[in-house]
Amino acid sequence: MKKKSILRSIALIGALFFLIFGANLGPSRFCLGDWILNSVGLPAWSQGTQGLHYPGFISLVGLVVCFYFFSATTKDPRKTTASLILGSILLMMILNFLLNLL
């Protein structure tokens, strides 16, 4: 039981990190993923300032992995996965709305 709660906690913290990693925050449109990739010498975009946005792609893959590990520790993984996906969509919509008010 303790292993499950530890795995859930790690998955939750990871999901929050990946939500912030790929999002543009505030009026300056700061993206943590852009900053991290640029600070280690990697481009954030596949073609200069356009193309595939690597932080967004990394964020989606990371969220899928976190959702999998969280759902794998519950009694009904399908219902948990659906709830996590819908909850994430709603959270991002609310955050986007609130950050655009700034």
Image (spheres, grey):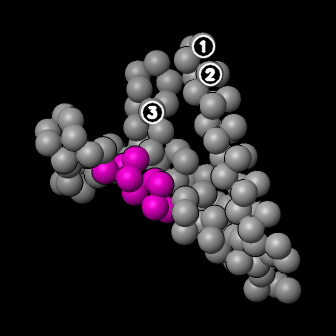
54 and 38: which is toward the camera: 54
Quarter of the rendering occupied by the C terminus? top right
Q: Which residue is mark 3?
A: 24
65 and 42: which is toward the camera: 65
Q: Is residue 24 above or below residue 85?
A: above
Q: How many C-alpha atoms fall within 10 Å of the one at disc 3: few (<14), some, or many (≥20)?
A: some
Q: Which residue is mark 1?
A: 101
Quarter of the rendering occupied by the N terminus? bottom right
Which label number is shown at residue 91? none
Residue type, numbered disc 3: Asn
Q: Which residue is mark 2?
A: 97
For the stretch drawn in magenta, what is the main secondary structure?
helix
Q: Which residues are magenta?
A: 54-62
Residue sitting at x 47%, y 39%: 23
Q: How many C-alpha atoms fall within 10 Å of the one at disc 2: few (<14), some, or many (≥20)?
A: few
Label 3 vs 1, first from the N-terminus: 3
Does residue 6 appear in the picture of this structure? Answer: no
Q: How many C-alpha atoms fall within 10 Å of the one at disc 1: few (<14), some, or many (≥20)?
A: few
Q: CA distance from mark 3 to mark 1?
A: 14 Å
Q: Is residue 41 left or right of residue 13?
A: left
Residue sitting at x 66%, y 46%: 88
Mark 2 and 1 residues: CB-CB less than 8 Å, in contact? Answer: yes
